[in-house]
Amino acid sequence: MHIFDSVQKTKREFIPLEEGKASLYVCGPTVYDDAHLGHAKSALVFDLLTRVLKANGYDVTYARNITDIDDKIIKKAAEQNKTIKEITEFYTDSFHKEMAAIGVARPDIEPKATESLEAMFGMIQKLIDSGHAYATAEGDVYFDTSSDSEYLTLSKRVQNEDERQERVESSSLKKNAADFALWKSVKDGSLTYDSPFGAGRPGWHLECSAMIEKHLAKPNAAFAVDIHGGGADLLFPHHENEAAQTRCSSNHALANYWMHNGFVNIDGEKMSKSLGNSFFLKDALKEYDGEVLRFYLLSTHYRSNFNFNTEDLLSAKKRLDKIYRLKKRLFGLAESSEPTAFKTELLKALSDDLNVSSALALIDEMITKTNETLDTAGKHKELKRDTLANLSFIEEVLGFGVKNPFEYFQFGMDEATKEKIAELIEKRNEAKKAKDFESSDKLRDEILAFGVSIMDTPNGTFWEKV
């Protein structure tokens, strides 16, 4: 398996710290608002990476944090006259539900900032003791960037004053303009946490380094984690500062491989709340099946910037429809347990830095050839069994085609209509069982009047939108 390392700017063979195992840490959401398409893209990329690592036989430990300490959370709570806990729990729950809707599995470890304060205190103290951090008269603690000879080697850039990102206003007592907060005292009467350094709140960059040390780092390892990932906007300053904190407080570097996914644009413009085009995932899910969004957002390479537009989304849906039509054609049959050439080639493509374009081309070719063969005379029993195995493998590594093929084509029908159709189908089945074919035909016509088609199979009667 090969991964493009964002820091070394080259594709590297994946060689884990521990044979047969892979550790992955990804920067998660700050839970003060609904998840947007950028969150969805990043979550999908690293969900795919986890699936491909597992398909290659690795025992994967995947951690993704929840940032539940932030000025934006405090502001939202004040605006809505709610507690901090009410805000963070609501948006954390929403995030989980929306990620599940697009097929993103929960991580193995999901630490919260509020549950990791002791780990942060320990890291700050180590940095102070080793001369890499200092306290100011105002009660703040800063990382001394001039003490780290390797600072900026991650992003390979010169510090730009305009690009500094901090939770709170910068202090005039900093030694260097580039120094960043590890702990900030708070004087405005807002939420604070007690610490050995005084009441305050942790700096933005601190929590991830502390969480990685707490949950993933192993003694005497050269790196705390195999892979660290996130959006491209996090490379600097967030990941740069994380790397500095870990490097200077421990005997190892933070990550062996760095992976960053591209931005999401909306109709050619970078997604931004200030532009009014921050497309919330919950709104997209009202219009499109979650698996359609998954297919679409994963349809371009993860490192490329993604341009979200309706035309391309509908084209992606048509490609996904083909998977489901083939699955429907083979519905109810048993799959083969034998390896297939297709599965080997698909995993080979995805193991090449998640080359999803090649993977989707293989899938398109497999579907076309299978349908052409099935259209000819003959039972093709083995082909059907192998094809079902191929479809199952697509489900496993890409998360496409996981639904009942008939239910997939029901998207957009309201629940009341679905319940009514289910009732009519049950009545029709009872009429057929009683050999009351006149009633059965009337009930069939009533079902079809909803704009659906029905199919009687050995596994039951199914319907879908026409």
Image (spheres, grey):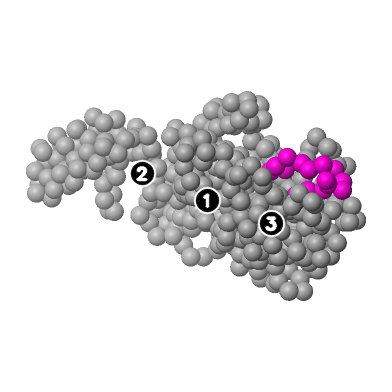
Q: Which residue is mark 3?
A: 198
Q: On the rendered image, what quadrant is the C terminus found in? A: top left
For residue 179, side relative to residue 93 (left or right): right
Give the structural element (helix, strand or loop) at label 3: loop
Q: Position of residue 362 (x, y in %)?
A: 60, 47
Give the structural element (helix, strand or loop) at label 2: helix
Q: Amino acid at mark 2?
A: Phe
Q: Which residue is mark 2?
A: 406
Residue under the image location 61 percent in, 55 percent down: 193
Q: Which residue is mark 1?
A: 104
From which residue to which does the magenta span run? 166-181
For residue 393, side relative to residue 211 (left or right): left
Q: Earlier in the sequence, mark 3 or mark 1?
A: 1
User: Label 2 vs label 1: CA separation?
Assistant: 22 Å
For residue 338, side relative to residue 158 (left or right): left
Q: Is residue 304 above or below residue 400?
A: above
